[in-house]
Amino acid sequence: MPTWPQTRLLITLAVVVLIIMEPVSWMTAPISPCIVNPENYGAYYANHNECPTFHVFLIVLVARVFEHFGDPNWVVADFTVVLALSTICLWVVTWRAGVRQSRDTVAFIGETRRIGEAQVRAYVDITQVRLILLMPQIVGAGETTLIRIFAKNTGQSPARNFLWHPSIQFIGSLRPGVAAEQKLGANWREMSGVGIAAGQEHDDGAMLGRAPLRDEQPTISAVIRVRIDFEFDDVFGGHHVGETYFAGIFQRKIMGFDQTDLGSTQWQGALRRTNALRDWDSVAKTERA
């Protein structure tokens, strides 16, 4: 439903009232008693005992007003009334302009503050993810998934309470198109986060348990996809959440193993950042670690 401005609404109502009162006055003119004294509106109305119509009332009213303006006895009173009305109108206009200016000033200050905070607040992103499938200590026990992330604050102020949560999908060559998924516990948001200073990098790791890569025969290659959900607070009280995706192809060495700074592994491969994987939730999950 459209909303009319107050001034337009009042003017419209006044015009409607004037339009309605004219025909009503014509219909009620022959009916006594009159709202006004007919003798004050000429001999016709006095002699015929008929009430003046609405337009006659307005004409006489306007004539009397002009008559008073021409009367020297009414000059001071007229001037006082005009001065009072002018003062009231000026006060109303000034008050409305002040209210509008105050509202615009508040909006301008709020927008300036928002832009300023956006320029200097913390901006955290996951720049790199490393994944190692550690060799089992016991033959046949299966590899253990170890993941390490690197997060950097590219903003101009510290990030507070930084938390992250990895989800990993394994798509093995023995079962093409079928994904097994590993992820940490669902209560990760209840943990205590860490702070990241402006321009600094933070790295952290997590052990996710046995990787779901074995069927009746050992998996020799797999597509591994990783989603990192993260969140942090800025110094202005804002709370920010985000997610990044990484993917890569890993292959098992037939003979021997590699020694890395994170441990020994028979798997070779690296994760690279990718666009959001829209089919993440639609890929069938056959196992959750």
Image (cartoon, rainbow, N blue to C red):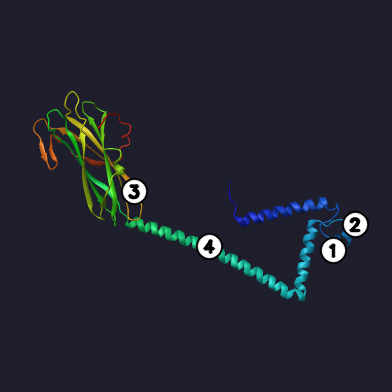
* Outermost residue, top side: 216
Q: Nearer the viewer, residue 44 or 120?
A: 120
Residue denoted by label 2: 48
Q: Residues at badges 3 and 1 in contact (C-beta under 8 Å)?
A: no
Instruction: Say whether disc 2 or disc 1 marks the residue closer to the N-terminus.
Output: 1
Q: Earlier in the sequence, mark 4 or mark 1?
A: 1
Distance from disc 3 to disc 2, alpha carbons, whole Å, reads 85 Å
Q: The residue under label 2 is which amino acid type? A: His
Q: Which residue is mark 4?
A: 99
- The percent position of residue 123, horizontal first and vertical second, equals 30, 52
Amino acid type, callout 3: His
- Helix, strand or loop under label 4: helix
Distance between the Cα atoms at labels 4 and 1? 47 Å
Element marked by disc 2: helix
Point out the tag, 3 or 2, that comes first from the N-terminus.
2
Between marks 2 and 4 in the image, the one whose residue lies nearer the viewer = 4
Judging by the rendered image, the residue that carries numbered circle 3 is 240
SS class of the residue under badge 3?
strand
Query: What residue is disc 1 on?
Result: 40
Q: Residues within 10 Å of mark 1 (few under 14, many from 20)?
A: few
Place residue 149 in its image quadrant: top left
Mark 2 vs 4, N-terminal side: 2
Q: Which mark is residue 194?
A: none
Instruction: Give the x, y percent position of residue 7.
Output: 62, 57
- Which picture quadrant has residue 113? bottom left
